[in-house]
Amino acid sequence: MCGIFGYVGSRRDAGTLVVEGLKNLEYRGYDSWGMAYKPNGSIVVRKDIGKISDVRSEDFGAPCSLAIAHTRWATHGGVTQCNAHPHLSCDGKIAVVHNGIVENYGPLRDALKTKGHTFLSQTDTEIIPHLIEEEMKNTADFAAAVRGAVRKLDGRFAVVAMHTDSQSLVAARNGSPLIIGAIKGATQGYCVASDIPAFLEHTRTVQYLDDGEMAVSDGRGILFSDIATGAERTKREIEITWSPEQARKGDFEHYMLKEIMEQKESVARAVNQNEEQILTLAKAIQEARGTFLVGCGTAGKACMAADYFFSVVAGKHVNYTPASEFKLYHRFLKPESLVIVVSQSGETADVLEAMRVAKSKGSKVLAVVNVEGSTIHRDADYTLLINAGPERAVASTKALTGQLAVLLLIAYALAGKLRDGRTVLLETAAEINDMLNPRYVERLKKLAEKLKDCRDLFIIGKGWNYPMALESAIKIQEVSYVHAEGFAGGELKHGPIALIEQGTPCIVLAGEDEVQQDILNNATELKARGAFIIGVAPRKHEVFDAWIKVPDAAAAQPIVNIIPIQVLSYFLAVSRGKNPDMPRNLAKSVTVK
Ligand code: G6P
């Protein structure tokens, strides 16, 4: 939520560079944007409502070597030009961009007002440049003033600040991500950003800022220190494996479609795990007293499906809880408990909170993540990467199937059948490659055309297809804004069936499994009330009015069943004139609770 990008170095096009970089972070928020640079020695701010992708980066080409930029997902204060970042101090000499929430901004603002500071926006962020300005009454050292200011903040923040009279970029972190990219060679410099894709075009050498740390750079070197004590910190440089090409849209019209198509390879990459490591983790799960699966949104649905994987494949009882609800389960946590957290970004605030609760009880945490080096990846006791590559579209697709593949592999390992699990999943990966052919995609596009004006859409599933029914609804809602709801097939009779009218489209997710007949019976009940039944299944059944064929994938059925729904959601959005990469009100990485 909110994307930050700053640059300091020997390049003289810092303004253009940060605006370009910010475009790679737009998935983090896109209600407004802003930037600050110093073309003539004093700070110039440009900001507006709307999308950074609509802004011409060449317009910021005036020579300068220090700039900061921000793309916003509003928390405090509406979507207005005034509330967009950066925010300035009273004297206009300090500019700040911020991601997170300052919880004590009310009293701080009141105190600053009594000292004569005036505020132009409704944001919590605006107090930060004014706090720095106050600190600068006691020191000429800009970095020291930032340190003094951020020490006063309660809550989660990533802050990047610049000053008219300083050539340094100052960054501070507590709870919200900030990563440093070090550019070597002739055009030496440093980038600081909320996520790696921002600077992937310039460097793959990164240093992660941890909570309670700050970084100061003049472009020639960088100094890390502890916010509380001021003590210097040494940081390892890490070479990341993602390439700039992976993060580009290429010939695809939208990232969402690109990422759906990438599942031809990404599922196989997820299965490519170190055998010994998987077996060690399976042992840890086996020995744990109480295993919990925790995630948010789509990742939460992967956890819910894994609940079935563990039960059906390995006969192991685990507990799925949405991360935002996990806090209340602390009573069940012991040092022998294991909490498996699943997250694409590795930065979701509610998941981090769940980890904190687990750690406070001495429980161990296993993280299944996509972004290497993310906070969740770094803070967990055990980790597994799903190897999906950068996921840019807000609607998660390839990360979900990667998560499902890794969790299913663990379930097989737990059952002592790791080899079988690998075989099932690699066969599934090959089937996905066949399935996502142009003719198949075209058929789904036509179906989307047919459904695009429907008022409601229902999706049902049973067993491990039940979480996929919930996920299908999320996908359809978030990109097309069609009212969609997912249910366990057996629950319909207890209320939702009252919503079915003549022609109401209902998608039925089925597999060749022990609950197949049950879900077909549920479909028949819907059809008897006039529903138009769209079956997603390996075989055509009589009850289906339309059939989307999927491979018979045994325990990997949820993986193949969700893929056509992802494609359908994409085309539903496009046919309704919506941009699936930027759904309204949403952001990809939810770094506030
Ligand atoms: C947001 C995204 C979802 C994602 C969820 C959890 O809501 O839009 O696609 O599933 O956050 O994110 P995570 O990065 O933890 O998987």
Image: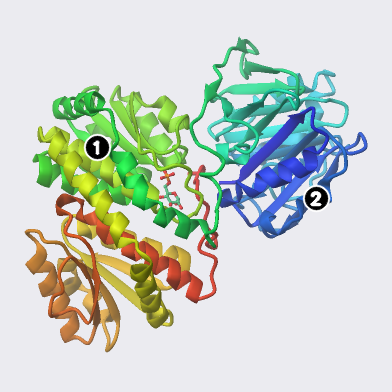
**Would residue 310 appear left or right of 330 to someone viewing this image?**
left
Does any portion of residue 8 appear in the rendered image?
yes
Q: Calculate the distance from the C-alpha at mark 1 to the C-alpha at mark 2.
A: 50 Å
**Residue sitting at x 64%, y 23%:** 214
In the picture, residue 571 is in which quadrant?
Answer: bottom left
Classify 139 as above or below 462: above
Q: Tag 1's secondary structure?
A: strand
Q: Where is residue 125 drawn, in percent x and y?
A: 68, 41
**Residue sitting at x 65%, y 13%:** 230
**Would residue 486 appear left or right of 21 to someone viewing this image?**
left
Please tell me which residue lies in front, 332 or 363.
Answer: 363
Between marks 1 and 2 in the image, the one whose residue lies nearer the viewer: 2
Classify 283 as above or below 446: above
**Residue sitting at x 55%, y 53%:** 249
> Amino acid under label 1?
Phe
**Would residue 173 appear left or right of 467 to someone viewing this image?**
right
Classify 258 as above or below 372: below
Which numbered dot is residue 292? 1
Does any portion of residue 110 appear in the rendered image?
no
Q: Which residue is mark 2?
A: 58
Q: Where is residue 572 drawn, in percent x and y?
A: 43, 72
In the picture, residue 443 is in which quadrant?
Answer: bottom left
